[in-house]
Image (cartoon, rainbow, N blue to C red):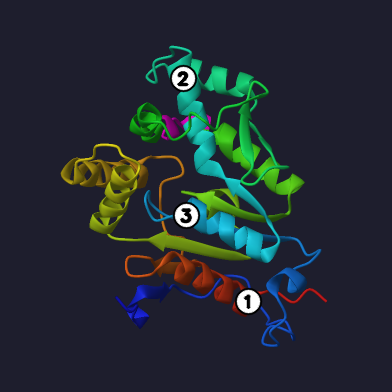
Amino acid sequence: MTPTDASILISQPVRRPLELHPAVDSGIPMKVLLEGRPVIITLDGPAGTGKSSVARTLAARLGLDFLDTGAMYRAATAIAIDRGIPITDEAAVVREVVAADLVFDWKVDPPRILAFGVPIDHRTRDRDVTALVSPVAAIAPLRREMVAKQRHFGAQHPRLVSEGRDQGSVVFPNADVKFYMDASPEVRAQRRFDQLTQAGLSADYGQLLREIEDRDRRDSSRADGPLICPTDAVRVDTSNLRFDQVVQTLEDEVRRRVVAKG
């Protein structure tokens, strides 16, 4: 299906005035335009919109580092499960996750997340983790720890594409460019169904749709760091866009909004 203008929705202008770089329309690659320049780009949105893959690819195109904050909450969930900590025992979950000292190995692509100094990325996409990550992510003191750590990563890696649920709204409110990726629940459920069946796993479309709708409600209604579209974000509906079209849309918008810094 050919995307229409309605596929890409741009919200109110960003709060801070932006100037166009004099070379922005010259065809110079963005890696060159952004070389050596601190820049933070955020991607937020609900589950199933392809944020992680898009953010990773966009970061590579722009020559920036990539931060998958969803992996941090998934790692926290895996830690609680594997150490037998009920997620209802919020204080114990937070203590164990803080003790785990979640960090990323930035030398690999995508960066590998470590807990207690050991890679834990092999657990982050397992079904038991997926089933519990939303309530774990709603634990307020855990979110405060994660936000502080994510800002620390941003200070260490000031040239960054960061994706999650609250990156533009909470963690990096002064990001140079903010995106909010969305797609209908039906499209997201179908994508997940296709992923599972192509991997040879059983899947129930109806159940997947209900899980996505439930997670959207939980993520949007939690008290701390709820899933919202920042008022100064570029909203991109990926329902009718191919992966390469989404990445190109974001890259073009970064090119258009790049800040002149001398």
Give, as a three-letter code, the residue at label 1: Arg
- Cα distance in 3D space between marks 3 and 2: 25 Å
The residue to which callout 1 is attached is 255
Give, as a three-letter code, the residue at label 2: Ala
Q: Residues within 10 Å of mark 1 (few under 14, many from 20)?
A: many
Q: Point out residue 126 in the picture as x, y percentages from the top left corner.
A: 41, 31
- Cα distance in 3D space between marks 1 and 2: 41 Å
Front residue of 141 and 258: 258
The residue under the point 25% across, 47% down is: 213
Q: Point out residue 158 in the picture as x, y percentages from the top left corner.
A: 73, 53
In the image, which residues are magenta? 136-142
- Cα distance in 3D space between marks 3 and 1: 19 Å
Residue 142 appears anywhere in the view = yes
Dot placed on the residue nearer the N-terminal end, 1 or 2: 2
Q: How many marks?
A: 3
Q: Point out residue 194 in the picture as x, y percentages from the top left corner.
A: 29, 50
- 203 relative to 40, above or below: above
Mark 3 in CB contact with mark 2 (< 8 angstroms): no
Mark 1 in CB contact with mark 2 (< 8 angstroms): no
Among the 4 quarters of the image, the one containing residue 58: bottom right
SS under mark 3: helix
Residue 234 appears anywhere in the view = no
Dot placed on the residue nearer the N-terminal end, 3 or 1: 3
The numbered disc on residue 71 is none
Quadrant where the C terminus lies?
A: bottom right
The residue under the point 62% across, 37% down is: 112
Dot placed on the residue nearer the N-terminal end, 3 or 2: 3
Q: Point out residue 219 in the picture as x, y percentages from the top left corner.
A: 36, 43
The residue to which callout 2 is attached is 80
Give, as a three-letter code, the residue at label 3: Lys
The residue to which callout 3 is attached is 51
